[in-house]
Amino acid sequence: MSRVAVVVARFGPEISGGAELLARLVSQQLAGRGHEVTVLTTCAEDYVTWADALPPGESRDGALRVLRFPVRAPRDLERWNDSMQPILRLRWTDEDERRALREQGPDTPALLDHLREHGDEYDAVIFFTLLYLPTVAGIELVRERSILVPTLHDELSVHLDAHARAIRAARRVMWNTPEERELGERIYDVQGLRGAVAGVGIDTPPPDPARVERVRARFGLDRPYLLYAGRIDPEKGCGELLDWFTAWSRRDGRADLVLAGRPWMPIPEDPRIHAPGFVERDDLLGLVEGALATVVPSRNESLSLVLLESMAAGVPALVIADGGVLEGHARRSSAALSFANAAELAAAAELLLDEPAVRAAMGEAGRRYVAANFTWERVAVLYEEAVAAVAARPAAGRR
């Protein structure tokens, strides 16, 4: 079997969403299929400051070997904002790019030194998230054995020339959805990059009514509720969600809103809004299974794990009208309704409250969609094929 390195900015069981969770799930699947997997990551837990919080060096996460490297310095938000000004003005130089990437972070020279000195000890190196410096700089060090999982969003930061060079240098690109692939091909003016639309495997236990009752009692939920799960952050659309839900609840009042995740913004004190913070996996499953619907208000998604887990549990979703990934899931599955403003969010929630047969049909459609498209049997094979392809590169391409 192959020796695989996985490069990701943050890593650990306490990180419950996004590219970091996807990296952990893929790493576990590869290790479970006999590959020797080493995760190369930072000592940071906080993506805002990148401050070192965990000790450097080697540790274990089950079957995974984890190597943590220190971040040169915590991110200074004022310096980062200053470094982004040439980018925002759409007139920048290569040095402007280098500065913006360093200030954005995580700036971890030791991780890059490891790739420079030990990269040829791995048969494949999988980079998660195109946005950050370890990916942009790291791919150049192990170009012939590189696999990129871009988790791409259409934000100004990914329009840098450095990102275009990195995606073109990668030997395989693993997209999460067809919409993400279309976005990447449009932004970077590339077609036919080798790789696949892989996505993720959704492997959740069957719904459990007892688990639902436990979480309802634990969190004081005695009415129907909409569930948001993930980082509670304006960048994730949570500000609009709170405003729009509050406007609807003042008029209707039949449902609550549950925000499950770490808050990065103020949450209003309102008896209809419940914010239990980070919840353990079993509690999160119960919250999903008991929800009227899950809500995904973020316009910056390349996949949305919580959306797919909701569908797997037979729970419909309400998704922001993003014109891309989320609406693609809604269109292909018939298991989600999209909304663009407060009135549309209210109308969608009221439909699910008033028409239980519609809600049940959407739930069954979601189950079918996930079962047909998001199994580890399919996804892990695609990753193994990518690993085998770069591991079998010609001898002349080896470092």
Image (cartoon, grey):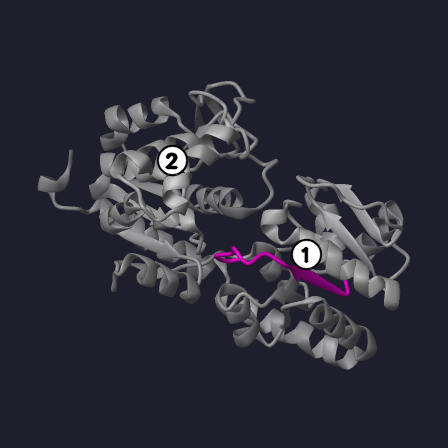
Q: Quadrant of the C terminus?
A: top left
What amino acid is found at the position of numbered circle 2 in the picture?
Ala
Residue 394: give x, y in percent of width and height: 12, 45
Q: Report helix, strand or loop for mark 2.
A: helix
**Residue at left offset 77%, top offset 52%:** 258
Q: Nearer the viewer, residue 265 or 15?
A: 265
Please tell me which of labels 1 and 2 falls first in the chain: 2
Q: Residue at image x 50%, y 61%?
A: 375
Secondary element at image label 1: helix
105 shown above or below 53: below
Residue under circle 1?
240
Give coordinates of residue 364: x percent, y percent: 66, 74
Q: Residue at x 39, y 38 (%)?
A: 6
Where 121 sits versus 19, above or below?
above
State whether residue 35 is above or below residue 366.
above
Q: Residues within 10 Å of mark 2 (few under 14, many from 20)?
A: many
Amino acid type assigned to the residue bearing label 1 in the image = Glu
Q: According to the image, label 2 marks what residue? A: 100
Marks 1 and 2, Cα distance to the nearest angstrom?
28 Å
- The percent position of residue 220, horizontal first and vertical second, equals 89, 49
Q: Nearer the viewer, residue 220 or 246?
A: 246
Q: In the rendered structure, which segment of residues is drawn in magenta?
A: 290-303
Res. 130 visible in picture: no
| Residue 182 position by quadrant | bottom left
